[in-house]
Every structure is written in C-alpha cells, then in structure tokens.
Amino acid sequence: MPYPEGTYMLLLAMLAQAGLMTVLLFALGIGRFSAVMARKVRFNPDGSQTFPKKLVWLSDCVNNQFQVPLLFFTAALLAMHLNAASDLFAIFAWVFVVFRYLHAAIFVTVNHILSRFAVFVVSALAVLAMWVMLAMRILGA
C-alpha cells in the first residue's frame, strides 16, 4: 500500500462518503425525472413545484450532504496535508461515514426526526473529534 495505514483508511472513508453523496444525487435526479414523467409534480402559479413527500425528503437529504460533510472532507484533507491521519483519526472518520449512511437511510425512508437527530449527533461528534485532534496537532498540544 503506497500510503500509511491511517491515510489509506481515511481515503477509503472519503471515497465512501463521496459515493453516498453521488448515489443520493443520482437518485434525486432520477426521482424528479420520473415524478415529472408520471405527472406527480404539481406546478404552482408562482413557478415553484410541489413534489411527492418522499422525493422532498430525498431532496432535503441531498441538501444535507453539503453541510456537515464539508467539515469532514476539510478535516480529512487537512489531516493528510499535516501528516496527522492517524489510525484514531481514521476511526473517527469511519464513524462519521457509517452514521451518515444511517442518517441518509432514515432520512429517505421513514424520516423519523428523533432517530435521524440521534444519528446526526453521533456523526457530528465524530467530526468534532477530528477537528479537536487537528487543533491539538496544529497548536502543538
């Protein structure tokens, strides 16, 4: 393997997160196209559209992929740049990714708010741990 173990595992976590984002984006595009073709979209007088509820959930889930995951990708890239991609850092990255997959699954199926929030908190804490580790490295602690 051409990378240290922590860096390699971090790269795999980044690929897994990017894969989730890509699958969700394509699912949204296909879902919207299908809804329009099946005439399940209501076109409002103000020019907006009303899509079926599950498609709105999918759209919200896609939007959510461009919020906290940006902190994840930034931390991961910075860790690799600073040679701070330890095994522990990679474990936190994988905790984040696994819980983002769970978050997305809840979001696009049952959308149970409390379950989704609990999973979100775990993923957010994992990213927070990544940033704390980076801050300690940068500040020399």
Image (tube, rainbow, N blue to C red):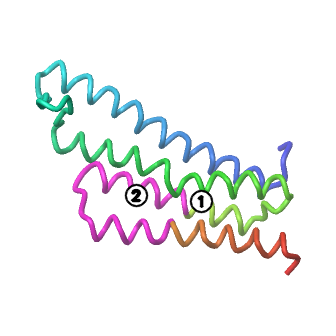
Question: What amino acid type is highlighted by mark number 1?
Answer: Trp
Q: Which residue is mark 1?
A: 94
Q: Which numbered disc covers residue 102? A: 2
Label 1 residue SS? helix
Picture quadrant of residue 90: bottom right
Q: Per the image, is 114 magenta?
A: yes
Q: Secondary structure at mark 2?
A: helix
User: Which region shows up in magenta?
Assistant: 96-123
- Along the polypeptide, which appears first: circle 1 or circle 2? 1
Q: Is residue 90 magenta?
A: no
Q: Amino acid at mark 2?
A: Leu
Task: Please tell me which residue is depicted at 48% across the width and 43% down the height of the picture.
Answer: 20
Instruction: Give the residue drawn at x 75%, y 65%.
Output: 87
- The 10 Å Cα crowd at callout 2, few under 14, some 14 to 19, many 20 or more, is some
- Residue in the image at 56% along x and 42% along y: 18
Quadrant that contains the N terminus: top right
Q: How many numbered marks are there?
A: 2
Image x and y of residue 74, in percent: 67, 53
With 60 as the anchor, is 45 left or right in this view?
left
